[in-house]
Image: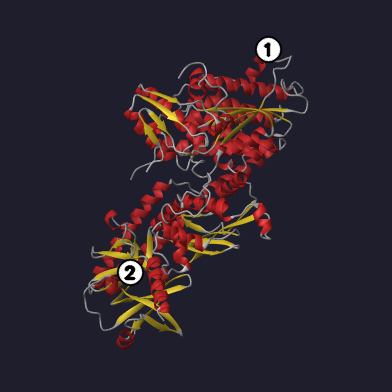
Amino acid sequence: MSFPDPIAVFRTEAAELLEQIEAGLLDLNVNLGDKDQVDAVFRGLHTLKGSGAMFGFDALAAFTHHCETAFDRVRKGEVPATRELVTAVLEAKDHMRALVDTPNGDHEATGEALLANLRAAVDGANNPGTGVFAKAAPGQNHFKIRFSLPQNAMANGTNPLPLLDELRELGECEIVADRSAIPSLELLAPTDLYVSWEVELLTTQPRSAIDDVFIFVMDEMQLDVTTVEPAPAARTPAKTQAPAAETLPAAVPQVVAAAPAAQPAPAATALVDAKQKKASENVRVPAEKLDELMDRVGELVIAQSRLSQLAGGSGDLQLRAVSEDVERLSGELRDTMMVLRMVPVTQLFGRFRRLVHDLAHETGKTIELVTEGETTEVDKSVIERLADPLVHLVRNSCDHGLETPEERRAAGKPEAGHILLSARQQAGEVIITIKDDGRGINKERVRAKAESSGLIAPNANLTDQELYQLIFQPGFSTAQTVTNLSGRGVGMDVVKRTIDALRGTINVTSHVGKGSEISLAIPLTLAIIDGLLVRVGDGRYVIPLSAVEECLELPIEEDMRSRGRSFISLRDSLVPFLRLRDLFRTGTKPDPFQKVVVISTGSERVGLVVDQIIGDHQTVIKGMSKLHHDVATFSGATILGDGDVALILDVGHLVAEGQQQEAHLRAAG
Amino acid sequence: MPASEVKEDCFRLPQNLTVRAITNVQQEILQFLDKTASTTIELDDDCQVDISFIQLLEAARIYAGTAGKHIALARPASGPTLDVLKRSGFLEGMSAEDLKFWLHQGGIQ
């Protein structure tokens, strides 16, 4: 067993503390009289300093001590909380982060400058009335803003230019791009953002106007805003700073000495206890640890399967009892593991607010985005991989789906176009839907384009669904104009590839003039599923249990009667079925009592004729090799208890094939 | 088939120089820089540009500098490229070298 590196543990804790400190400072900035926030910031600084000293981060401890002392004075009522003080400590917080990350770095000069700011802020707070903006006219605020967007901002559809434009609209503004983080070309990830910005702004707007500009990316970005005070005529000369320096001692030994004195008041202590209790109920675990655990659980399930098989073939009742216990426990362990990996789609949907906002700006359209089912939970690896396809689909809806306000007015529609992004669970799948009330897909144009590019034969008989699926072909675009958002036919094939890789399906419905709806059905998890193990010829296969509706016998006479048409009558409705023996060309004779496993995706059903139903099976999904990635009938493979490999049937593909067969037979009369 | 056109040491970039196409552009420029000692980049007047392209050319300048090669724009930045340079704050605080590369100011390319 490996023990975690204590320094790594400290860094994780320090990062959390710094987040808490930042949150407290930002809340305090809104309400400077909030004593709870003053206490919270003080406690965070106090803990960070103490832990830092304990783990040998002396520079951090010494630096943090100054901020703690400043907040201790605020706590005791010796100086008021001011925005300047909050800003100074916010800047100092970033420096603390650097001291945590690179304790041996050259931080002295920056630290000194920040401490000078802090002293000035405490001084200013102590002598209200000395702060006058040097450049700013009365009623104007002078801000220095430094911000960096998330590295994947551009890839996720956030264009920094409109944000900079919005800042300019706030007042007199100077924007300087910081290019220092741009690497050499061979090291550049070209869709990542390496540029950050420094902005100086003179405005009559309050600080909150700056936050508003970044409201949609605020959670993921770094934003530091400093209110600039001019050098006043009676700026405190060096000598008169001495007393302040005394109140903010710099020596490390005093850091430790000051610690015991910093005891929170009883009421605050109760609050801390409650918060700490709440915090102790949650544990933060790195994602790769969860993946590792998932792999282990997968191996356990395979071993358990082998044990079950051995026990089943043995007459030892005690062995069977133990095997059943292990089976139950491994099943429960698997279920618990699944829950741990689930995260709500709200994380995914959140980023589209900003995307739609920007797209509306760029296209000149009025677009309202509505999200539903944000609490729907999906495996974290699925969420990560869904982001790109959804960006493409939302872009497409905004750019091609929705009409311009003029077109909408002419069509008798409200000026604002609507896009609905929703998520829901349905039988082991999550259904993500992107629906717009735009112009809909022009089927004739899709057909013409497909015919001209040779994707389909002229006048080919296709269902609407088959026709719509053509839009996911590489290079397929019916857009008459290519914009910088979409229209080049690049993107929709990426959507298809990603959804295929996730073992999902895409369903498109559209009505001209009314809008389109694209539904992505994705398995809730990509790791372990409950499966139904069946035999076809000499091979064994797994059907995902979540898709199985029922199993029934196929009598010989029914089998003979249905030859050539492949339908069974199921409670007064005809269900198409596929003989897997024929599909897989096993070359074996059918068993005398064949079975039909009825599977479904949503409202569409198809029966699969198999030779034998072996039983349920916990299926650890293993990917297919590169050689087999084009085989559409199977979505993966699994290892059985006896070491054999069983292929996992791709339900979506089989249902589509069955429905296609039904359509052809119906068309043939 | 890349939309870029190559003639001797002159490299004409495709129209779409936004984040959606930038990965291909990176590969093409890298390959071209590796083949020649001096590269002149040609841009369409009506090309589509965003910050990813400006960033890419900055990275290409660093690469060329390290490899002892020369890279320049065939013409001073204008149109959409100049607009993005202005809006993104790249023009502010440009060094003499930057001005020379982007705007052909202060020397002959």
**A114 and A320: which one is in front?**
A114
Residue A39 visible in the displayed image: no
Residue A374 visible in the displayed image: yes
For label 2, count other residues whose C-alpha is less than 10 Å away and answer few (under 14), some (14-19) or many (20+).
Answer: some
Asked if residue A467 is positioned above or below residue A416 in the image, the reply reads below
Asked if residue A474 is positioned above or below residue A604 in the image, the reply reads above
For label 1, count other residues whose C-alpha is less than 10 Å away and answer few (under 14), some (14-19) or many (20+).
Answer: few
Along the horizontal axis of the image, is A544 left or right of A107? Answer: left
Give residue A190's mark. Answer: none
Residue A339's x, y, as percent? 46, 58
Residue underneath mark 1:
A237
**A417 and A637: which one is in front?**
A417
Labels 1, 2: front one: 1
The subunit carrying tag 2 is A
Residue A272's x, y, as percent? 60, 42
Rendered image quadrant of residue A227 = top right
**A482 and A300: which one is in front?**
A482
Residue A94's x, y, as percent? 55, 30
Q: Earlier in the sequence, mark 1 or mark 2?
A: 1
Quadrant showing the N terminus of chain A: top left
Q: Give me the residue at 42% from left, 68% from top.
A: A546
